[in-house]
Amino acid sequence: MTNHTNHMNSSHHFSTDHIWSKVPPFWPLRNLIAVNPLLGFDALPFDTALQQGHHYFQKKNIPEKMGIVNQVTIKWLQLFLDQGQATIKMPLRDHGFLKAICQLLPFDKKVIPTTQNSFFSTLPTAPEEIIEKSLAFLKISSEAHEEFLTLMLTTLPGWASYINYLNYWKNDQHVPREIDIPKDEYLAFRLLLTCLLWPEAKELFLWGQHESCSKEAEQTLQRVKTNEKNYRDNLVKKLSMQKEQEKLSPEAQLVFCIDVRSEPFRRALELQGNYETFGFAGFFGIPLSIENSLNGEHYSSCPVLLKAKHRITEFPTSQHQAWKEGYQKLSLFKKLYQSVKYSFTSPFALVETLGSLTGFWMFLKTFFPDVAHYLKKHSTGLFEVSSPIATIIDSISFEDKCNYAAGALRMIGLTQHFAPLVIFCGHGSETQNNTYASALECGACGGRPGAPNARALAAILNEPSVRKELLSQNITIPETTYFLGAQHNTTTDEVVIYEHHLPEIFSHHLPTLKRDLQLARAKNAQWRCEQLGRKYSLEKAPIHAILRSRDWAQVRPEWGLARNAAMVIGPRWLTKNLNLEGRTFLHSYNYKEDEKGALLTGILTAPLIVGYWINMQYFFSTLDNVAYGAGSKVTKNITGKMGVMQGNSSDLMNGLPLQSVYKNDKEPYHELLRLLAVVHAPQEIIDRIVQQTPILKKLFGNEWIKLVCMNPSNNKPYLLKKDFSWEAL
Amino acid sequence: MSLILNLFYIDRLAGIMISLVAFIGILILIFARRYMDGDAKHGSFTLKLLSLVCVLAMLVSANHLLVFFVAWGVSNFLLVKLMIHKSHWKQAYRSGSMAGRNFFLGLIFLGCAFFCLYQVSGETSIQSILKISSSDLRIYFSAMFLIAAAMTQSAIWPFHRWLLSSLNSPTPVSALMHAGLVNGGGFLLARFAPLFLERPSLLNLVFTLGILTAFLGTLWKLMQPDVKKMLACSTMGQMGFMMAQCGLGLFAAAITHLCWHGLFKAYLFLSSPSAAQEKKYPFPVSKTWTGFLFSLFGGAAGAASFVFASHTPFSFDSTLILVCVAFIAGTQLSMVLLQNCLKNFPKAIAVSTLLGGCYGLNILVAEKFLAPLSLFQPQPMNPFYLVGLFVLIVSWLWILRKSATQHEEPSTFWLRSYVANINASQPAAETITNFRNDYQYK
């Protein structure tokens, strides 16, 4: 959002940014970020946006000629945006997109069949001029420019979404010029193809204006409202019956990500002993960029709305050299394999040499995924999650460290009564042969596992100088408290604690905690297996979960964030005794420590927005898995190592695949409802924050998110209505 | 009972093929139990897959012309039904019907061939027909028809379009197709090998078409930006090479090739969902001439070890083509190791010796196992083979040169050829999902 400028081009009757806002951004497969597919419509009331979405994205039967324009567009985009699939790459890519295309198009007999084309030969070079000339050629009146250009994007929405990402959202990701497309060049390219292939494209308006059946959207809305009311009534009734309990000093405190998958696990753990758990955004408030010490590659580990501020390196402490050698050996092996595979003549020898081996390997992977997993692990000996890992956080200044430390503790309301062990538990997932693996990782870490952030915050809080500074800010961390990082594997429910720096005197606390984590794991795995349609005993369930995570044929290794419905912002006692069925994001918050409402503003404008994007992604992928989702995994085809198409070639399928939100081809698993934010704070504070924050005013006023206030004075629920008045429930 | 037994003839060739089909079939069946869990048509998919495996087993062991013909037709029909898994998706339907039309043409070719054979011999037993030695022109024609049928089945140019347009099928179906049915052409030629071995001119024809397809398939494979099209083009190239091996008189080598390639390609298809996570390394480029020269020594080691392991006497006949392939693969491996320093020379020699040895051993085993059928008959060198050899070497040298000069400004000729080849390797227009909402998962 931040880099949007409302820039009006003087010579045009349209605003480029306005046109581009119609399509959402689409992150590449390496870090799939959940996004509201109707992001550009969120200034409209939800029901109107639903109609608009139907109008732009759910219409059927495009004019045949436009289909041909799309086909040629897809072909060239695939070639240009390829990030490493093709060995013989498209020539001239380093000239930039439009220039390369204009030099190659004359040879494309499918576009320009004759050598002389008067339109093409008199083409200007600047994208703006091409846009102007093409619009004139197509005889589009100036008032209709914006609408026509929007249609150029929405008739091929997936690919346009990726270009939107490249232009507005790639943030600090470095994208080389060879695979980057400026927004104007894309529009110019679309128009150019349209002029060449369908000079009468003005007819597209007829299709564009054709009223699509709006009844469908209305019916959807009714269904959604019923779902929401049922869910809300049930939830607030349960919440309003909770009472604050006296706190016993806990054996350990664990801070989990707000992710809906943490809720059932926290509940299972709390049942095992006296543990206090908290919910906090999984990047733990530190915008990091993580560098891999083995290959030097780095990535941002923070929400995409933020920019990574500190680059940190992680490496295994004990066998760094062995790891490095192992890694080099593995890459050498891959290089050898690829050099024979991606060349002329040599592949014929390769298949005969490796054929029997791959046959055997395939047999193992299909019939004995476990054995295959162990073989692979032992033959590479690499990337053990539990290996001791050192985090170098020197790049974070002392001042920043103190800010992160104090900010994190205040945010979750943990400023006193520290337990001997405080564990920051990020989360990651483990799946095999899964195109959408990064969609199961931590959204707050930009589609990456959260362990590095957890380790970094723990290291900061263990520094004596930081603790000393916190003391002056009225946060007293006793010497009897130690912080540790950990990671919750959401596919297997295993929790790995990074305990390698733990001083001797604390080590006696660990065994009980580890035992209880194992028990919680079994319990949660059992429940999750049930959600996946399998009933197992407590002993068998974790084994089945592990099997799912190692199975290369598995299309539903876990349910991810499906069925997400609400975000509860409040203390744990409000939800502790409730079974919330893994449907709620839980953010710890204590209004008493936040008189000015600054913390709550932070929660409502960051984690809640992330939750809202996730909720909308699941919502729309369920609503129409073709228009807003990625379709079935069964026929997917990965293009350019960045996105998914269906079959031979198609639009870039942004959104979630069918298997992530549907039990089978017919029955959805996810339930259609908008995110319900439940805030445990006085109405006046919420009122003030909402009125002062434009984005919240927009989202609540247009009913993209619903909000219920649990008034702390009487613990009664009040619903925020779209006119910002309160309705007692 | 004996009547039924007469309809079938289970020899070693049939044994290999049945094992391959059963292995792949069952593996894919189990894979699909999880991969297609929740799919509305999973039940009928399983049923069709099982029937297909049975029909294929009948096909490869058929001895009666009619049984062979019917099994050929039915197996292809079942494949088409499997391809159109998502029947509401019109592009998938068109992919299937396109393949169906191709297979129907193939069936007609096969029918013509069988009709001619029956006319000449009055026999319906394939084994009896193969024993007849006659110079009747009709046998020549029937052999031509057999070649045509094999070409349609194995996607040999110009019958390759259906294969490149077949990716609207579910991934397990693609795996089965690329590991199983597309090999039908190679099996057909091997089954009727004696007809071809008596007619060298036909061998030359098969070889030429095979090499052309091998070249085009490999070139297109290297250009594709998406994983499945890359795999489809690669299969096309491998099928071309398999046919070329038949054309060399080395039917046994073609059979090993189709088996190992089948397993390899099935694996690649089933693991294609990981394509985005697989890191692609740049093509190895020798920075110095010495590096390249030393790599050639590595290649020579590979070739020598191939000759040694396969027990083929190094002679100036059609086996030279295989030696050349081993040589190129060995050089390619050595180039990776010798890219930056020559210190790795012993390693390079070792690795390419290993590769050449494994490759050679494969050929040896196949040759020995299929020896009773005399399917390994090296042909004397001729101009066709020499041209083929030239194509294999020059295309490889070209990609080396291309990679070394990738930063230079491309010539107009290259731009023109690039676009032409991209267009030639595109799936048929009507099978591309131009508009998102045309896609249907039902």
Image: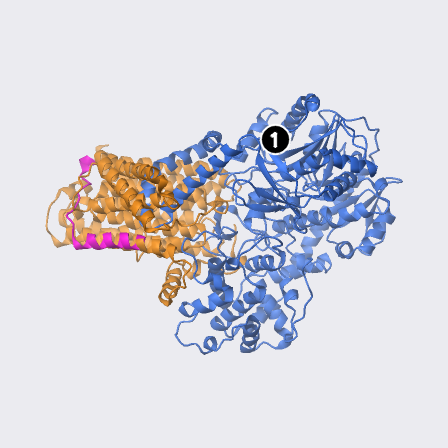
Splitting the image into 4 quarters, where does residue A264 fall? top right
Asked whether residue B391 is drawn in magenta, I would say: yes
Quadrant position of the C terminus of chain A in the picture? top right
- Specify whether A17 is left or right of A597: left
Question: Chain under label 1?
Answer: A
- Specify whether B200 is left or right of A480: left
Q: Position of residue A22 (x, y in %)?
A: 64, 62
Q: Tell which of A694 and A554 is nearer to you.
A: A694
Splitting the image into 4 quarters, where does residue A1 fall? bottom right
Please tell me the colour of chain A: blue
The residue identified by callout 1 is: A494
Magenta span of residues: B370-396
Three-letter amino acid code at the position of disc 1: Glu
Q: Position of residue A544 (x, y in %)?
A: 55, 30
Q: Position of residue B318 (x, y in %)?
A: 19, 47
The chain coloured orange in the image: B
Identify the element where label 1 is drawn.
loop
The residue positioned 86% from the left and 44% from the top of the image is: A595
Question: What secondary structure is the stretch in magenta mostly built from?
Answer: helix
Q: Is residue A654 visible?
A: yes
| Up-down relation of residue A174 to residue A262 (above or below) | below
